[in-house]
């Protein structure tokens, strides 16, 4: 019997994977991530599928690097559930900020590459910054 293929990774599913990584605690491997995403979505993806998407691959690498430098907590966890929840939320936000800053840096590097290549081809910054044409909304199929 042929195994069903997981549906394509949409922006929403990619967001679930990245948010799972943002909240990740403890050992991180591709297999553990795949298991966690399957539990969250009901679909099992492969490591190779995840690695094809730069946003997932970068988030995985960043989380892996950040986990390498951490040691287990030596103090006990707070008893108050609200405090534990607030700490967990702060940790998720911190991970998300680190990931977004790294993604922003990659986008800035891409922009510099594009701008340099455009300049080499004679495209000026004024040309690149020109506003986009407005869509013709009044036009219908019958009239031109």
Image (cartoon, grey):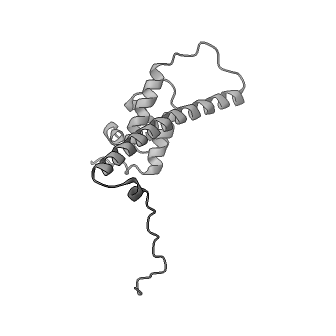
| Residue 55 x, y percent position in the rendering | 41, 41
Front residue of 136/98: it is 136
| Residue 109 x, y percent position in the rendering | 39, 40
Tell me where residue 32 sits by quadrant. top left
Q: Residue at x 49, y 23 (%)?
A: 26
Above or below residue 11? Residue 58 is above
Q: Residue at x 42, y 87 (%)?
A: 143
| Residue 31 x, y percent position in the rendering | 38, 31
State which quarter of the image contains the C terminus. Answer: bottom left
Q: Residue at x 43, y 25 (%)?
A: 65
Outermost top residue: 74
Above or below residue 44? Residue 60 is above
Above or below residue 8? Residue 57 is above
Outermost bottom residue: 143
| Residue 81 x, y percent position in the rendering | 70, 28
Q: Residue at x 33, y 45 (%)?
A: 116
């Amino acid at each position: 019997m042929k195994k069903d293929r997981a549906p394509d990774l949409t922006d929403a599913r990619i967001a679930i994977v990245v948010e799972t990584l943002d909240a990740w605690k403890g050992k991180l491997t591709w297999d553990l991530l795949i298991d966690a995403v399957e539990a969250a979505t009901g679909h099992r993806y492969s490591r190779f599928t995840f690695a094809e998407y730069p946003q997932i691959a970068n988030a995985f690498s960043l989380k892996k690097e950040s986990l390498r430098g951490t040691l287990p907590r030596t103090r006990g966890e707070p008893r108050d559930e609200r405090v534990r929840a607030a700490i967990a939320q702060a940790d998720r936000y911190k991970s998300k900020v680190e990931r977004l800053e790294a993604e922003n840096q990659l986008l800035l590097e891409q922009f510099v590459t594009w701008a340099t290549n455009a300049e080499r081809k004679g495209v000026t910054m004024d040309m690149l910054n020109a506003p986009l044409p407005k869509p013709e909304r009044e036009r219908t199929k019958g009239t031109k």
